[in-house]
Amino acid sequence: MLTHQVGLAETNEAISPMNSSLQNAPYQNPSITDQETTTSQEGIKIPSSVSAQTNKLLQPMELDKDCNYCPDLVGVPAGLALLGSLPDEKDRESDEGPIQKVLMKAFAIGKYEVTKAQWRFFIEQSGYTTTQGCLTWVGDGYDKPPKVNWKETGFAQTDDHPVVCVSWLDVKAYTQWLSKISQKSYRLPTEMEWEYVAKADQGLVPFPWPSGESPCNRANLADQSLLRLYPNWRLVGCNDGFEFTSSVGSFAANPWGIYDLQGNVMEWVSDCYSSTIQVQPWKNSECIKRVIKGGGWDMTEKYLRNAYRGRAAAHISSTGIGFRVVRDFE
Ligand SMILES: [Ca+2]
Ligand SMILES: [Ca+2]
């Protein structure tokens, strides 16, 4: 369950960076996407600066937050990421390959999706104006009702629900602001980092739960509770108890102690979408769509698979898309 609920009374508190338990650790961990890579005989792509000295985190570990309204973080260790899905995976799509093996450096990632309270604090402190026009299902298609935005989503949300109606441009601005006020290096996860954490050393599995287990026990997805409002929607045949978004941390954590990677809201990642998995960063400034991972409250199990690759243009926002952050070790 959520353990960091914060009250509105704290909204105007001054931000003071807190000491991270890893602040003085000897990490040198720039983003893997900024690195040159070499390929080993086994076909594993290895960032050139990876070494035993720069990856000392041996297991996932909760870290201190950098400020009251900063996201909770979990440090994840260096390790081998397996990206993509096996050809015989149920519901696999053609853009989920070729399978990549990449040696990842340690980094910290949001324990939860960024919440509405955390987003409100950003807006109040920065004066940022969120992208207008939030895609919303209106019964016979998607529209952008003028009154729907991150504050008023058209369904009930409390402060510990994930923020939605935020575009890729908006969430990038959030990470830049967070970096400035915390004096740490925040950014969106790369697609590789997101999938590395979602698979959590379990191999090329479609989900973090055992085959055959009801997804409604493990994630907030498009379940039978949506039927009343979305009678023609594609739904799974079970009930997870939440029509729309749920409080972050309402379902069990994955093996690395990270919540809601699958379901609740889809999550923006930094990568530009292409028809195959790209290990190297997209350098083209004319990126058309950004990748979205994990499926959400309005999607069926198929879209919650670790390897599924949603996508949307950077200026698009919707009631189903949110995000989580990554923080580099200094
Ligand atoms: Ca649900
Ligand atoms: Ca999610």
Image: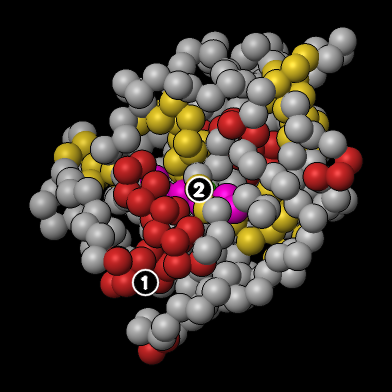
Say which mark, if any, is on residue 187. 2
SS category of the residue bearing label 1: helix
Amino acid on which the number 2 mark rests in the picture: Arg
Q: Quadrant of the N terminus?
A: bottom right
Q: Position of residue 251 (x, y in %)?
A: 62, 59
Residue displayed at 45% across by 21% down: 283
Amino acid on which the number 1 mark rests in the picture: Phe
Q: Residues within 10 Å of mark 2 (few under 14, many from 20)?
A: many
SS category of the residue bearing label 2: strand
Residue displayed at 21% across by 34% down: 141
Q: Nearer the viewer, residue 240 or 151?
A: 151
Mark yes or no: residue 24 visible: yes
Residue displayed at 50% across by 45% down: 188
Residue displayed at 72% across by 47% down: 28
Q: Which residue is mark 1?
A: 121
For marks 1 and 2 on the same chain, the one whose residue lies earlier in the sequence = 1
Mark yes or no: residue 319 visible: no
Q: Mark 1 to mark 2: distance in Å?
A: 17 Å
Q: Which residues are magenta?
A: 321-327
Q: Position of residue 33 (x, y in %)?
A: 59, 31
Indicate left or right for 39 with 127 as reference: right
